[in-house]
Amino acid sequence: MKKDIILAGVGGQGILSIAAIIGQAALNQNLHIKQAEVHGMSQRGGDVQSNLRISAEPINSDLIALGKADAIISLEPMEALRYLPYLSKEGWIVVNSVPHINIPNYPEESALEAEFAKLPNVISFDADAVAKENGGVRTVNMVLLGAASMILGIEDTKLEEAIGDVFGRKGEAVVETNVKAFRAGREAGKKQMER
Amino acid sequence: MTDKLLLLGDQAIALGAVHSGLSGVYAYPGTPSTEITEYIQENKLARERGVRSDWCTNEKTAMEAALGMSYIGKRALVCMKHVGMNVAADAFVNSAMTGVNGGIVVVAADDPSMHSSQNEQDSRFYGKFALVPILEPSSQQEAYDMIRYGFDLSEEVGLPVLMRITTRMAHSRAVVTVGEPIAENPLHFPEAGVANWVLLPVNARRRYREIIAVQDKLEKMSETTRFNSYKKGGKKGVIACGIGYNYMMENLPADSDRTILKVSQYPLPADIIREMVEECDEVLVIEDGQPFVEEQVRGLLDCSGKIRGRLSGELPRDGELTPDNVAAALGVKEGQHFDVCSTVVPRPPALCAGCGHRDVYSVLNEVIREYPDHKVFSDIGCYTLGALPPLRAIHTCVDMGASITMAKGAADGGLFPSVAVIGDSTFTHSGITGLLDAVNSKSNVTIIISDNLTTAMTGGQDSAGTGRIEAICLGVGVEPEHVRTVVPLPKNMEEIRKVIKEEIEYNGVSVIVPRRECIQTLKRKSRK
C-alpha cells in the first residue's frame, strides 16, 4: 500500500484538518506517514498545499516528486490545477467546484472547466452545497474527504474512526456533524465517479 | 513505555527536549521554528514540571536567558528562525567562549526557498564560526532522538550544541516512537569554578585555546556517532546531509552501489571524507541551503575536480532541495508528467479582511499622497503585505526593527516626510533602541506602531510589550503630546487622518499607535 496525495486550497479553508484525519487513520493502521505542510506568511489568504504520503514501507522524501501523486484533493478548482505537474498520468483529482475568488484576475470558470475536461480522472462537484445540506458550511473539507475516500486506499470505517480521534476533544456533536458530512461527501463522490 | 505519535519535526524536537529533562525553552516566534515552543507550552509533562516556556522579547534575550539557566546546571533550549541567529549571534558565539554547565541546544530553523523569510542564510556557518558541534536530523525520529543526544553532548564537551533544521523538517509530520522522560538536572555549579564565565581577555584567550583544542575530539565524535554513517561502494560517491539524505534514498535504486556518507553531525568527519574522495572518481554533495559542506570539501582551488553539487551546477545554487532536483543530480531519468497549467494565476498572501493594518495603510496613503517625496520604511510582520497591490503603502522591509532606524537615517539625510511603520511585537523585539537613537538626535520622523496586541504573522503568540507601548515610548523620551493613540476603524478615519497629518508636520519624533486586536486572535477567542 502506497499513496501520495496533494491537498490543496486557500489559507484558512481547512486542508490541514483533512491531512490530520488521513494521517490519524494511517497511524491507527500502523502505516508510515510523511506530511509536509505550509505555515507562516504563505497562509494569509494565499495558496496552500500539503504533501501527504502514506505507505506500508518506510518513506524517505517529505515531498512528492513530479508526476507521482496518486491524487490531488482540492477545496477549490484553480488550486487543484496549480499542482497538475505533480499528478501521475493515472492520478485522480477530487475537487470542490466552487471557486474561492480573492484575487482580481481569477480565471473564468469555463476556462477551468475546459482544463478539467482534458483530464481522465476527475471528481468535481459542489461540495459547499452538500455541506450546507448536511453538516453545515464548515464541514466542506469533510465532504471532500468523503468524496476522496474511495481512492485513498483506507477503509471508510477507519477514516470515520479517525474523525472521532481528531475532533473528539470538541465533543460528540462535532464528531457526529463531521461524520455526517463525510458520508454525504462519499455518496456525492460515488455518483460523480459512476458518471 | 514507548509510544507512537504523529509529530511535526518541530514537535518531535519539543517533546524530545521535554523528555531530556529540559528546564526552560527560550524563543522568539519565527517561521518555521514557532511550533517547538508552542508544543512545550501545551505539553502536560512540561506544565507539571513547570518548564519555563514564555516567549522572549527577542532571540538575543532568549539565548542569554538560556545561558544563565545553563550556568546553574540546568538544561535549556533556544529556538529561532535562521535570521534570529543574527540577532542572537553575540550571545551565541560567546556562549561557546564561556562554555556551558547544564546542556544547551540551540535550534535554528532555516528556510531555503524563502517560504516565509527574507533570505536563505545557512545557520551551519554560525556553528562552524562558534566552533561548536552541529546536529542536522534527517528524519523526525532522528530529531526526537538527537535532542537528548545533543544535551548529553553539550554537557560532555562543555559547549552549546547547534541543531540546524530546514522548513521541510520543521513542518513535516511523521510517526515518531518516543521513550521515557528523564528528570531535570538539579541546581549545581561546575567543579572547575566559574572563571570561564568572565570573558576578560586573560580568560577569553585561555578559553579560545581550549575550544580549539577540543576540535579534534569533536571531529572524531562525528566519525563514530550513530547519526553519521559511511557505506563503501563504487567509484561514485555521495555526501548527503540532513534531509538531503532522504531525497537521495527516494531516488537511488535498492541495488545502487554508490559510496554514501550520511552526515547529521558536524564538524565534518575529515578522515572519512579524505578516504572517500581518494577512492571515488566523483563525490556529489547533497545539502539543503548553502554549499557549506561542498565548499569545505572542495576548497577554494578545487584541485581534484571531483566534488560536485550546488557550486558545480549539478544542483541549483539557490532554493531548497526537492526529490526532483536531487533526482536530476543523481542522473535519474525524469518520468512523464503533466505540464504546468497556464490557466492558473498566482494567489499571493494578503492582509485579512477586516485587519486593522489595512485601515492604517489606507488612511496613511491618503495623507501621504500630498507629499511627493515621502518614503515609508516598514518592517517584518503581517503589515509587510502592505507592499503588495492594491495598498502599495511601504517602500522597505529589511530586518526586525529596521523601520525606525532607517527612517531616522533618511530623515537625518534630509528626507521629509520620513515615516516608519512597525508592529507592536517587532517594536519590542528590536525597535526600542532605534527609537532612543531618534529621540536623542531629535530626528524628524513619524513612527506608526501598528498595535494588534499579538505576534500575528506567526500565529498569534504573546507580544512582549502588550499594554505598555505608549509607556515605553514615553520612557524612551518621546514628548507626551507626540505619543498619539487611535483606533483603526473605518468610522475613525477622519480623526486618524488629522493625527497623521499633524504628526508629520511636527518637526521631531512622533509616535502614533493605532491599536486594534488582530482579527485572527479575536476570532479564536470568540470561538472558545
Image (spheres, coloured by chain):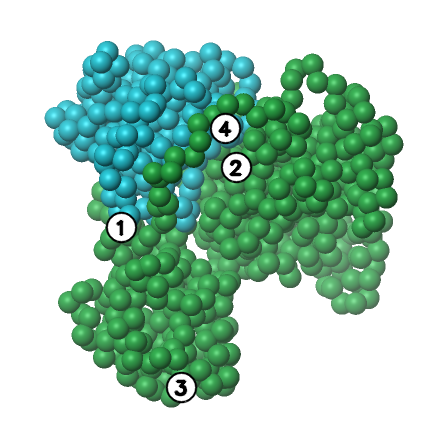
Chain colours: A cyan, B green
What amino acid is at disc 4?
A: Leu
Determine whether label 3 and label 1 are within 8 Å by CB: no
- Name the residue beneath numbered marker 1: A104
Tag 4, which chain?
A: A
Please tell me whether residue B306 is drawn above or below residue B401 in the rendered image. Answer: above
Tags 2 and 1 both on a single chain = no
Taking the spot 34% from the left edge, 87% from the top edge, the residue there is B506
Callout 2: helix, strand or loop? helix
The Cα atoms of the two marked residues, 2 and 3, are separated by: 47 Å
Camera-side mark, 3 or 1: 1
Is residue B451 visible to the viewer in this orientation of the structure?
Answer: no
The Cα atoms of the two marked residues, 3 and 4, are separated by: 57 Å
Is residue B206 visible to the viewer in this orientation of the structure?
Answer: yes
The Cα atoms of the two marked residues, 2 and 4, are separated by: 17 Å
- Name the residue beneath numbered marker 4: A66
The Cα atoms of the two marked residues, 2 and 1, are separated by: 31 Å
What amino acid is at disc 3?
A: Gly
What amino acid is at disc 1?
A: Pro
Tag 1, which chain?
A: A
Residue B83, image x and y in percent?
A: 56, 55
Tags 2 and 3 both on a single chain = yes
Determine whether label 2 and label 4 are within 8 Å by CB: no
Callout 3: helix, strand or loop? loop
Callout 4: helix, strand or loop? loop
- Name the residue beneath numbered marker 3: B508
Taking the spot 36% from the left edge, 53% from the top edge, the residue there is B456
- Name the residue beneath numbered marker 2: B168
Counting residues from the start of the chain, the first of labels 2 and 3 encountered is 2
Residue A165 left/right relative to A61: left
